[in-house]
Amino acid sequence: MKPASRIHRPLAEAAADILRQVFRDGKVLDRALDRALAANPRWGRRDRAFIAETACEVARWRRALEFLAGAPDVPALCAAQWTRMGLEIPAWWRHPGATPAEIRDREGALGGQPRAIRESIPDWLDQLGRDELGPAWDAEIHALNRRAPVFLRVNTLLATRDEAVAWLRANQVHATPVAGLPDALVLPPGKLLPKPLRADGRVEIQDAGSQLIAPMLDARPGQYVIDACAGAGGKTLHLAALMRNQGRIHAMDVNAAKLRILESRARRARATCLVKTPVTASTPAGHAATADRLLIDAPCSGLGTLRRQPDLKWRLTPDRLRRIRATQRDLLAAFQAMLRPGGRLVYATCSVLPSENRAAIAPLLETGAWSLAAESTVSPAATGFDGFYAAALDHTG
């Protein structure tokens, strides 16, 4: 974002209010931001960009900004962020932190601070990352603090990648293909996909790392596929395109609201092979041994998506992570019954932690009833994508 010449008080106060909701009340940043923008339709594009950048970057760099400002209060963190953005702090912005000159002086010392401060993560999470990833953790958390570009997946039910590129260009959006991913495009840094183009159906916003998951199912046209944790359906719709709308995809989730979003997205994408089902305790038994392919895109810490959800690291706790790991084990134990003998199960997360990934499928492999057909670990540091893990297990028992 190009800095504005001055900071407008209502916008500054709106950004600070969003951050208080995130840090004090545990609200999800995206939702708090969306509510604020929806409540103020008169804000222009630059106004919205200022609020979004302030809220997102303060959430991303909370501990580093606290070091620079010398205070943890939201007004002081905002002042430090605005100083980094090259903006002049107005006299009316009262805060207990350092002056702009002091903040700039402290910038040089930030690199010498412990990683948890300079990369702005909780101490417990830094220790966990070091324990699980060893020397690789430094590069991964550094990459996860970079701003994420917008990746698109071409909906091949409606267009080829070349056709989508030409259509976007005709609408003044310049996208380039992503090497190694046949349906992926990336927008230039800082660019977004305009809302009318999002509603068209020819492209979907989907991270490049996420686009590696659905092909691992090797789902063929005419097969019966269960997406057991479909959510809002990014991977579900990718599967529909890979299967050319031929066969049946059962999209399941415990959250009925997410399935309603998926239904709307499916209409837009012209994906007609989907059936949506809310998950209940009886779901695995009711679909026992029916699926040729089973995708378990499990609930996880989400640490691979910190570039897009920087506030997540402040909501995650050791206890919550323990509960998430237990849920992953429970889902694998219960949902595998829906796969027919000889079928393929793909287990996936958007986490970079081995304890949520290979460790989760290890008990299945130890039974001897499964063989590991393929495994993918998507490193943000190596790829520039979000962090993902997926394992394809063929049933041999």
Image (cartoon, rainbow, N blue to C red):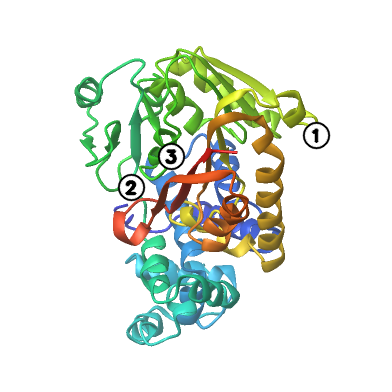
From this viewpoint, is residue 301 visible?
Answer: no
Q: Earlier in the sequence, mark 3 or mark 1?
A: 3
SS state under label 3: loop
Q: Quadrant location of residue 224?
A: top right
Q: Quadrant of residue 258?
A: top right
Which element type, helix, strand or loop, lies under badge 1?
loop
Q: Is residue 320 above or below residue 79?
A: above
Which residue is at a point 47% across and 15% down the rendered structure image?
271
Q: Is residue 371 above or below residue 353?
A: above
Location of residue 296 with respect to 284 vertically, above or below: below
Image quarter where the C terminus lies is top right
Give how far across and how far down residue 321 sits, in percent. 66, 61
Residue 105, quarter of picture: bottom left
Q: Earlier in the sequence, mark 3 or mark 2?
A: 2
Asked if the residue under mark 2 is in contact with the one under mark 3, i.e. CB atoms within 8 Å, the reply is no
Q: Is residue 54 visible?
A: yes
Instruction: Report crowding for label 1: few under 14, some 14 to 19, many 20 or more residues within 10 A (C-alpha).
Output: few
Amino acid at the residue labelled 2: Pro
- The image shows residue 302 at horizontal and vertical percentages of 54, 53
- Label placed on residue 281: 1
| Disc 3 versus disc 2: nearer the observer | 3
Q: Amino acid at mark 1?
A: Ala
Q: Earlier in the sequence, mark 2 or mark 1?
A: 2
- State the residue position of label 2: 149
Give the left or right position of residue 31, taking residue 387 as reference: right
Which residue bears the numbered disc 3?
Answer: 213
Left or right: 332 as drawn, with respect to 385: right
* Alpha carbons under labels 3 and 2: distance apart: 19 Å
